[in-house]
Amino acid sequence: MNTKIGKLSSTAFTHLVLAGYTLLAMFPIVLIMINSVKSRDGIFDNPLAFPTSETFSLVGFHKVLAKSPFLHFFQNSLTVTIVSLVLILLFAAMAAWALSEYKFRGNRWLAVYLAFGIMVPIRLGTVSILKLAVALEPFHMGVNTLAILILVYVAQGLPLAVMILSEFMQQIPKELKEAARCDGVGEFKIFFQIILPLIRPAVATVAVFTMVPIWNDLWFPLILAPGEETQTVTLGVQQFIGQYVTDWNAVLASLSLAVLPVLIMYVFASRQLIRGITAGAVK
Amino acid sequence: MKRFSFWHVVVFLAPAVLIYTVFSAYPLLDTLRLGFYSTSDTGAQSWSGIANYTKLLTDPQWSDAFWNAMRNNLKFFAIHLCIQNPIGLLLAALLSLKGVKGAKAYQTVIFLPTLLSVVIIGFIWQLILSPLWGVSEKLMGYVGLADYFAPWLGQESSALITLALMSVWQFVGIPMMLIYASLIAIPEEIIEAAVVEGASPWRIFWQIRLPLILPTLGLVTILTFVGNFNAFDLIYSVKGAIAGPNYSTDILGTFFYRTFFGYQSQIGSPTMGATVATTMFIIILGGVAVYTYLIQRKLQRHAF
């Protein structure tokens, strides 16, 4: 009898702690979302209430979209993130294949050289990256272009992607590759038509990992591409809020707009992402 | 049995190695080099040996700000270490218990903030803690603590702690997930053997599970260390480049930014910026070295 009560109370404790923390994690985001669709009076009179027919208002969103080229920022972020992602995945998969499949001299050194970038933040090279960007100006890859952001993010994302993909490549059965080679299939064909489709699950995991820091970054957009034309969502929101601090409707709406795409992505990719972290950590 | 040619290797490796070298490795090396130069008023750069470093570490005009940022950064890290890891461990331990209903749902929600931009999180908390809006005061009022509310972000004594707690709130999902993963990877037989021997769940946790996940705690610590000593976005978006009030929230990232780009009356200096960046590089590398050579080895010996 006693153990039964003990078990029940420990289950209750577990759920109390977990649910409590879940509430704490959700509260700030939900609070911003519900207040972004309220009128100014609604926001201040009762911040914790859901919008009613009286307080419901989209004025904040109208202001944001009228006062700042938000959709344009969004487009910039999307371009930078997607192009960087595709290049990182392709180049990292190619490099991982060469490093794990071909035993050539200097193989290990090259792997260590690339792995160095996992721990050392690329930000520390900012002074010289800006110099480089200025030098690249005649080639349309200079300051205030999306191209320079993409190049820096590719350099930033490659090390971790190469490492994770190498681990997966090593698990591909040898027989598969040897069989293809015996049939006289070329190395490039083996890579693109056999290996790439095989490592698809790993590629998806790496994709989510690499995408998030790129989408969220403030540092490089602030330093390399602060012009209105090339601002990303993160930088755009930061500047917008700095300018309209006192306009609560607009501030709340801009925050909601910035959260929404990540939220939507998470709804679709959360299982993949969590499985990826869980699997990766065990190794 | 050489099936591949030199050209295969080159073609597969060239894009990654080239971009990584030009935009990551070279800038880092060039920054290390620039740290030994000084910039004249005309913008010309000349070799000056370790003059920048002596200036940074000993000339009061620089060193006061540097050591202040360093101290704040250490505090920022200590708060993460003392609060983020224990909470992450507690959540992971509860989630890994057998038969917890809704574990996946809890996990998914608690992990969500880590995916959002630090800038957005900073602004959201700034609004919540704002005395103008009064949300925090109201919430504290429900439990009778309204009198204890203060504009924490605006006070010199509490601004840094508040910012660190905001960051802990955002990133607690990472230690939680990593620790959870290593907890569920512990072979069932070990636990069962202990149960048969009559060990209490409490003892099983402290004497069997915890030692086995120490390497993961080490990993979480070094990840936090690198992240903290390279942090910038949160302080910059909530407090600006000046990291007020009175530099009480200034950390190495914001100090580096001001040194490089200048602020108010001070003109930015790329060479002095490079010196600060190199110093940060040495600190981070030092942390990583300590982790790999000391902690990881010791832990692995301890664990197996």
Image: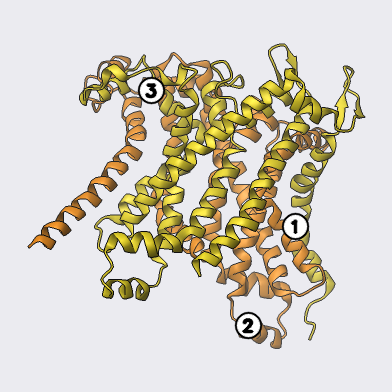
Chain colours: A orange, B yellow
Residue placed under numbered mark 1 in the picture: A113
Q: Residue at x 44, y 58 (%)?
A: A272
* Separation of marks 2 and 1 at Cα, in angstroms: 26 Å
Q: Residue at x 21, y 22 (%)?
A: B144
- SS of the residue under disc 3: helix
Q: Position of residue B158 (x, y in %)?
A: 45, 22
Horizontal side of B147 relative to A258 (left or right) equals left
- SS of the residue under disc 1: helix
Q: Residue furthest top?
A: B265
- Residue B4, by quadrant, is bottom right
Q: Position of residue B214 (x, y in %)?
A: 48, 58
Q: Tell me which chain the residue with mark 2 is part of.
A: A
Residue placed under numbered mark 2 in the picture: A174
Of labels 3 and 2, the one closer to you: 3
* Separation of marks 1 and 3 at Cα, in angstroms: 45 Å
Q: Nearer the viewer, residue B48 or A81?
A: B48
Which mark, by number, is residue B129?
A: 3
Q: Position of residue A221 (x, y in %)?
A: 64, 33
